[in-house]
Image (cartoon, coloured by chain):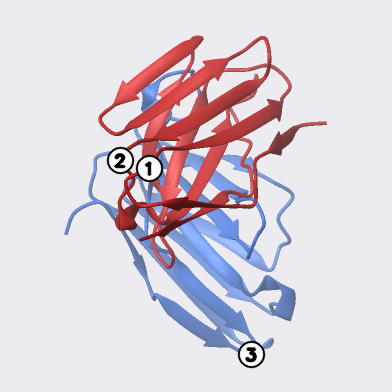
Amino acid sequence: ETGVTQTPRHLVMGMTNKKSLKCEQHLGHNAMYWYKQSAKKPLELMFVYNFKEQTENNSVPSRFSPECPNSSHLFLHLHTLQPEDSALYLCASSQASGGASGANVLTFGAGSRLTVL
Amino acid sequence: GQNIDQPTEMTATEGAIVQINCTYQTSGFNGLFWYQQHAGEAPTFLSYNVLDGLEEKGRFSSFLSRSKGYSYLLLKELQMKDSASYLCAPMDSNYQLIWGAGTKLIIKP
């Protein structure tokens, strides 16, 4: 496996379900990110982890709970979601977070398409 | 506030040249990124400009003018596989990427 891998690729869940999205990177990067992508809207940064420590939480509702057990794995735990949370959730990684250099180049996973009924 | 403006959609012909413009207003500036995203796929990195001028990379070039808050992506010798969305993302003073909504480029034979 190379690059950034996300599972599952598609997820349908009810508003009372609990599910998790998983992301794994095989690039030796130190920073990992969760983004939300809705149709025709800009990418929304949700969370940033740098060396396993959360460094950014962009006012994301508590029904989204991230977990970063090590610098290669990132999870997004989902519970009591709303239909408006339906979107493509993208994981990304970079060598570093912050600093004006190519180390901030993001490598994205293919995304998890979430539908909340 | 911070704002990115790029056209929603553009159409071009195979073999031609197209320029996708991006204007931005950010709190500080630490470079600008362009990404390509094919439908249903992950965004992939195309270019990074931090100084004024043109950066050429094969068929793709990216230009930056910091004083004008302006960048463009130039695609030459267009191929059908270039049909995708192109995302402009400047980085602000906090090293946060500010994303545009993307320009959907449609290539016609």
Residue A82 is at least partly visible in this image: no
Please give the residue where the numbered disc 1 appears in the rendered image: B16
Q: Report the amino acid beneath label 3.
A: Gly
Marks 1/3: CA–CA distance? 47 Å
Which quadrant is home to the C terminus of chain A?
bottom right
Nearer the observer: mark 1 or 3; the answer is 1
Disc 1 sits on a residue from what chain?
Answer: B
Marks 2/1: CA–CA distance? 5 Å
| The chain coloured red in the image | B
Please give the residue where the numbered disc 2 appears in the rendered image: B77
Q: Which mark is residue B44?
A: none
Disc 3 sits on a residue from what chain?
Answer: A
Q: Position of residue A55 (x, y in %)?
A: 57, 37
Is label 2 in a helix, a strand or a loop? loop
Q: Is residue A76 left or right of residue B82?
A: right
Is label 3 in a helix, a strand or a loop? loop
- Judging depth in this view, the residue of A82 and B14 nearest the camera is B14
- Is the residue marked by circle 3 packed among few (<14), some (14-19), or many (20+) residues within 10 Å? some
Check chain identity for marks 1 and 3: say if they share one.
no
- Judging depth in this view, the residue of B75 and B97 nearest the camera is B75
Q: Is residue B4 left or right of residue B9?
A: right
- Is the residue marked by circle 1 packed among few (<14), some (14-19), or many (20+) residues within 10 Å? few
Q: Report the amino acid beneath label 2.
A: Glu
Q: Position of residue B90 (x, y in %)?
A: 58, 29
Q: Please, is residue B51 above or below residue A69 in the view?
A: above
Q: Residue at x 69, y 80 (%)?
A: A80
Q: How many marks?
A: 3
| The chain coloured blue in the image | A
Q: Residue at x 62, y 33 (%)?
A: B22
Q: Residue at x 44, y 55 (%)?
A: B84
Please give the residue where the numbered disc 3 appears in the rendered image: A14
